[in-house]
Image: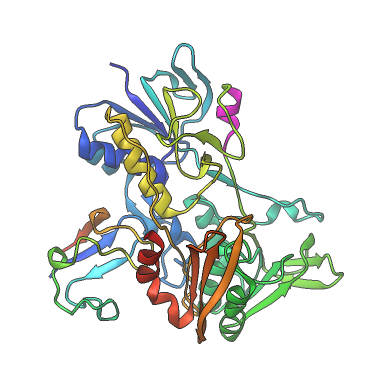
Amino acid sequence: MKVWQCVVCGFIYDEKAGMPEEGIKPGTAWADIPENWACPDCGVAKADFEMVEV
Amino acid sequence: MNPIIVLGSGLAGYTVVRELRKLNRDIPITLVTRDNGDYYSKPMLSNAFAQNKDAVGLVLTKAADMAKQLDIRLLVETDVHAIHRDSKRLDTTSGMLEYDKLVLALGADPIRIPLQGDAADEVLSVNDLADYAKLRVALGAAKSIAIMGGGLIGCEFANDLATAGYTVSVIDPGAYPLASLMPEKAGRQLLEPLSRIGVTWRFGTSVQCVNKATSGYALTLADGSAMQADIVLSAVGLRPRTQLARDAGITVNRGIVVDERLCTSDTSIHALGDCAEIEGKVLPFVLPIMHAGRALARVLNGEDTKVVFPAMPVVVKTPAHPVAVSPVARDAVGVWQELASGRGVKMEFIDALNKLSGFVLTGEYAGERNEMAKRLAV
């Protein structure tokens, strides 16, 4: 399980926790999140995320 | 071959470089910045305190790592004196630089309202990481803060600092929060939730005078009332940095004027971000910068392309009452209609052609941002 960070606003996505409030189940790998998903904080697309730590 | 030179290391400057490198690894790029070149997320400046992040903690990537990752020449702490367009050279404090194409990603300066009093120049504003570091130092010994301006940045700071336990007052000459972005009914939704976490609102007046007091500052407002605060923070808006372009004879209006190819009146010089004006609009928000950065990268890579802006909702980071808004121009013709109200409101703007052209979602409706943005795009 990895943790990803939005390079624009610093939003963190933790694969272990998922984002139940956005309909993404805990344990969802970053790769399995739809391409049209956007950062809930700043609206930046998935392509602009950058991995910060494992 | 002379490099593409990018002026500015904010989101606009680094985004265009990052996007260009996805398309082209070979083209030489020099990035010139008056800052230290560290990459940080500017939107976080106004909500980092409650997350316990200091200025160092906000740096996402150090300057040297940016230079390596992006394979660019990075000139930091460098000021540009002038653009010599006929010889395509830049006169800088790091020497004369020749460019093939020039990208202006200069950003904007905080607007400062003239104030009276012996502490008028001690009023802070937070527009970059160095400013934020100063605010953090000041907050260390403070209990109360007066924020001038109830717009996006003012409201975000108010929420962030009230949550952290500071006594916060927001002073704004308008009638309600976020007035430049949304109608009164929507803006008023923030009043009660932010009051509950300790924000005192003072609308219909402004700060006139800031004097040193035995502890902190004594403020006098335009309505004659007085107020005391340990810190005074000004958040009344931004003014695009246009002087360098103006001095070089490039067309400037409110911002540096660019077309759909992000091209200024000089075809070798482009502009984007907070300093630029496209189709009469200055769009100092994250999403327009990302879209402009991607389009400009393609243009710089030799493609014939135009920037297309989709629906770009702006998120106001006020967790006490979250807000998402797709604003309409101040002179837009149409009506705001209320679709729902509960703990917040959901409103849409229907223009003269009976088309949805803006929306605002607050409180419990803020999560419907993506659905509304999709409807807007149709």
Q: Image height check: is B134 above or below B102?
A: below
Residue at point 13%, 63% (across, down): A31
Magenta span contains residue B246: yes
Q: Image height check: is B100 above or below B220?
A: above
Question: Is B377 in front, or is B192?
Answer: B377
Q: Position of residue B356 (x, y in %)?
A: 47, 64
Residue at point 32%, 47% (across, down): B62
Which span is picked out in magenta?
Answer: B241-247
* Residue lying at the far front of the rendered structure: B353
Q: Is residue B224 left or right of residue B155?
A: right
Q: Position of residue B269 (x, y in %)?
A: 44, 26
Is residue B68 visible to the viewer in this orientation of the structure? no
Q: Position of residue B192 (x, y in %)?
A: 60, 84
Residue at point 32%, 18% (across, down): B2
Is residue B53 visible to the viewer in this orientation of the structure? yes
Magenta span contains residue B307: no
Q: Which colour scheme appears in the figure?
A: rainbow
Q: Is residue B280 left or right of residue B200?
A: left
Q: Position of residue B214 (x, y in %)?
A: 77, 68
Q: Is residue B178 left or right of residue B163?
A: right
Question: Is B226 in front, or is B293?
Answer: B293
Could you tell me which quadrant the N terminus of chain A lies in?
Answer: bottom left
Q: Image height check: is A36 above or below B80?
A: below
